[in-house]
Amino acid sequence: MEAAIQSKKEIPRSAEKMDSELSKLGNNLVTKFHVLMRISQIYDSKNVALQQFIQESLHAINTFVQREGSIRLKIVGDDIFLNEQRLRYSVEGFTSFKYLLTQWKKRLIGEVLYKGALDEDALREFIYILMALEDGKEENATLFNETLKERHLSSIEVGPLEVSEKEEGAYTLEKENSREVGKKVFFETIGTVKEVITQIKGKQHADVRKLKRLVRKAVHLIMEDESILLGMTTIKNYDEYTFNHSVNVAIYSMAMGRRLGFSRGVLSELGITAMLHDIGKSKIPLEVLNKPAALTDEEWGQMKKHPLTGVEIVLNLKQLGEVNPKMVVGIFDHHLKNDLSGYPKLFHKKRVSLFGRIIQVADAYDAMTTPRIYKKVPLTPEQALAVMLQDRDVYFDSILLKMFIGLVGVHPLGSLVLLDTHEMGIVFKPNTDPQWIERPHVVLVDRDRRGRGKKELIDLTERNGGGRFKRSIVKTLDPNKYHVDIAKYFL
């Protein structure tokens, strides 16, 4: 059976690499455009402050043109396509994506084509013509092209925004589907956690009001369909581990809280607590946090202080308002372990709080399934659950762990699986019916004739004419072995 999927292994490998390179170039381009559009609203076109940004952007554009022959950036719905490949958000690039989408949609510009290399004057003219367009004017694309022609900028063309019949307004982002809202909330929350932690490190005033608003949005999404944000936890950003991990732990924790019947208010408190559970690490030197080798006794002593340091920080975050004691205790407790053998050491025995026990489970699972500087290849979701089950009496509340397994599934969300049809699939959504817990929804790992990933969603409860299941899971596979980027299928 391994041989049956071996032939599939080679095709995705080269295509994945090509997609990754194109995506990296595309993300760089979007970031450059974001900076140029912002700068153009501050300085006039002759200002010398613009020079450096123009040069950097020209290098990015012309490098791409030299490689591909041309650049076509196109907006389709709430996605940006680069030469017919959809660009995927990255944690650090989300703000640039959001800004470009909003600004182009406001001006009803949906497509830009660079047919050849640009010079400094051409790029400068293009940006200032774009930003001078009136919002919502239907003929903007036509007027833009006429202006480009008058100024002899024949290497650039623009196209109008294509608006589907389902969209209420040409440049509004209000009627989005829940999955798109989930992406935005996820990436924006990571960026906001990063801002808060950076402010605390720099001993600045930390603004947590935005974080509270985003947690409320996350609660709404989880109440509506928990699988939306759970799918986003498959995104593991190695370079942004601290912030990515904090948000993932909050998502798992809130989803567990929902299953425990928590009210929206309590879910919000749990979400904030989980998001700030490692805030005490902001006071630990980076060389200790990112040390690839084993920690010394002194360094480990510093690490073990972070729950108590986190409590002190949270109690001083005035914009959190009145802090519920459950939040403070939850942060203090998240490394105590179920048998109290963890840290901080207690003078008097106590039971680990419910918030603390929930966060313990979420924290351990996400840490095990995420690449770290000292462990580049993480455990698969199935392997992580096996380890957690083995240690359940010492480390975890066994009832909460059992509930967590029900949440992510017997075949955990984001697992790469082999089907009895010799197809590979990624577990996309657990089956909510306990009768079919072993038959989740999966996305087939397959490619069309152009080498692009297809996203065919399959329900494993589906049967053929003879009453037999069309597909069944045979076993779990290691995505690193087959060069499959799991997160791409959730974006």
Image: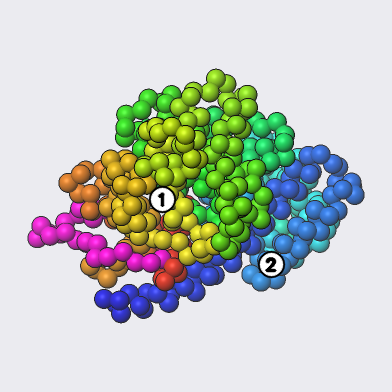
Q: Is residue 461 magenta?
A: yes
Asked if residue 300 can be seen in this view, the reply is: yes
Q: Position of residue 342 (x, y in %)?
A: 45, 45
In the image, 308 versus 198, the foreground residue is 308
Residue hosting label 1: 365
Asked if residue 250 can be seen in this view, the reply is: no
Q: Position of residue 227 (x, y in %)?
A: 37, 43
Q: Residue at x 39, y 60 (%)?
A: 380
Viewport quadrant of the N terminus: bottom left
Residue 225 horizontal side relative to residue 298, left or right: left
Instruction: State whether the magenta stretch is mostly helix, strand or loop.
Output: loop
Instruction: Looking at the image, tell me whether mark 2 or mark 1 is earlier in sequence order.
Output: 2
The stretch in magenta equals 459-479
Q: Position of residue 452 (x, y in %)?
A: 46, 65
Seen in the picture, residue 456 relative to 480 is either above or below; the reply is: above
Tell me the crowding category of disc 2: few under 14, some 14 to 19, or many 20 or more residues within 10 angstroms, Cα based: some
Residue 410 horizontal side relative to residue 467, left or right: right
Q: Is disc 2 placed on a helix, strand or loop?
A: helix
Residue type at mark 1 is Tyr
Residue hosting label 2: 65
In the image, 487 versus 8, the foreground residue is 487
Q: Is residue 414 magenta?
A: no
User: Which residue, as the protein is rendered here, is positioned at the far left?
Assistant: 466
